Amino acid sequence: MAAVAGVALASCVKNDGNVAVSAQDEITFEVAKYKATSTRAEVAFPTDQSFGAYAYYENTVTPGTHSVYIDNAEIVYKVADGNGYWAAKGETYFWPTQGHLDFISYAPFNDDVTSAAVPKINDTDVQQTLKYEGFKVDATAPVDILYSDKAMQQTANTVNYGFTGVPTLFHHALAKMNFLVKAFRLDNRNESPDAVTSWTVTIHKITLTNIYDEGSLTMTTSNVHDAGATTVQWSNTIATVPYDVWSNTSSTTTKEWAVDQVLTTTARTYGAGTADPAQNYFVLPQALSVGVQQITVDYSITTNAPGGQTATVDYVATKNFSDFPAVPAWEQGKNITYTIEIDPVGDEIHFAPAVVDWENVDGVISF
């Protein structure tokens, strides 16, 4: 694999002497994030962030050969005359007057192209293979990494996602986790209206263990020639697992959220309002294996008996995520929400995993 890497061109106008450019048509980008539940991208790319872009030039004289035209340029949001647009930071790149450009983008931008967070693009197969190699998720501050569809045979700025420029539709390379908590009931009023027992349920800590945090991803696409300006998606090459996951090393990590949260019968985000709530937590896409990925919940139940007596009991419960087939894998682009439900009568924790926002999946986890 040859990494398409390097620094942005020092010149203000991209022109290597062999490519004719129009000084009137700066290359801009139309940017959005993929939303699986819609036929069009509706999630705007944050204007306070930047992304990296590569472009490859093919001329009409020697078709089939591609030369690097934009080499890991940082693309930022700019405003001119009251209008916002996305374009290269520092440099100005113009559309060639002959031939076309193919574009591949990623986020967040990194000027160190040797970083594992920067995808490596294969030049030998005309940029049909994209790889993340040896990427390790930072358990303390995981970052959303994105890759775009390949925009092919582009010759001019177009309008699609609310901006004018190269269609740049990003996909999430990781999976995202959220944990909601609730009590199944807090009293037995319905069962015993004359002798009501009530409970106070408090979760003290949620711990994820043996979560794979390092791996690689190889994706391929088929180039579309002579079809006019278009975009093509990337496909995961892993054929041994029926899920959209990464190949992982044996490296694992632990994530812990620790806050005393008194439960209600309404599901709420664990740790909501704290600096580190149990939501939007990025993890390496991975299949869930027996005896590997686990969740431990530390909680207590205080029983308030009808006669006025109270008693508090502490519990520590551990379960394998693989025990619950509704979510057999944490797949790319899926925002997985687990609802942890504790029944103080049966001392049971129930999980109701669901995937929301990117794709939706429902299931039940019970202890």
Image: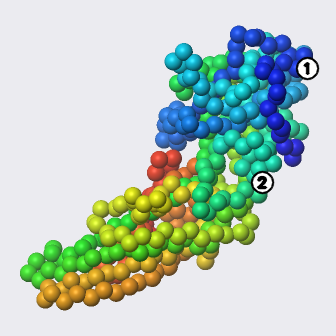
Report the amino acid beneath label 2: Glu
**Residue 166 rendering spot, x and y as whole percentages:** 66, 25
Give the side of residue 111 with respect to residue 84, left or right: right
Question: Residue at 76% across / 57% down in the picture?
Answer: 134
Give the side of residue 193 with respect to residue 216, left or right: left
Give the side of residue 296 with respect to residue 131, left or right: left
Residue tagged 2? 133
Report the amino acid beneath label 1: Thr
Q: Nearer the viewer, mark 1 or mark 2?
A: 2
Residue tagged 1? 62
Q: CA distance from mark 1 to mark 2?
A: 33 Å
**Residue 365 rendering spot, x and y as whole percentages:** 44, 70
Check disc 1 and report its element: helix, strand or loop. Answer: loop
Residue placed furthest toward the left: 194
**Residue 94 rendering spot, x and y as whole percentages:** 74, 18
Question: Residue at 88% across / 20% down in the picture?
Answer: 16
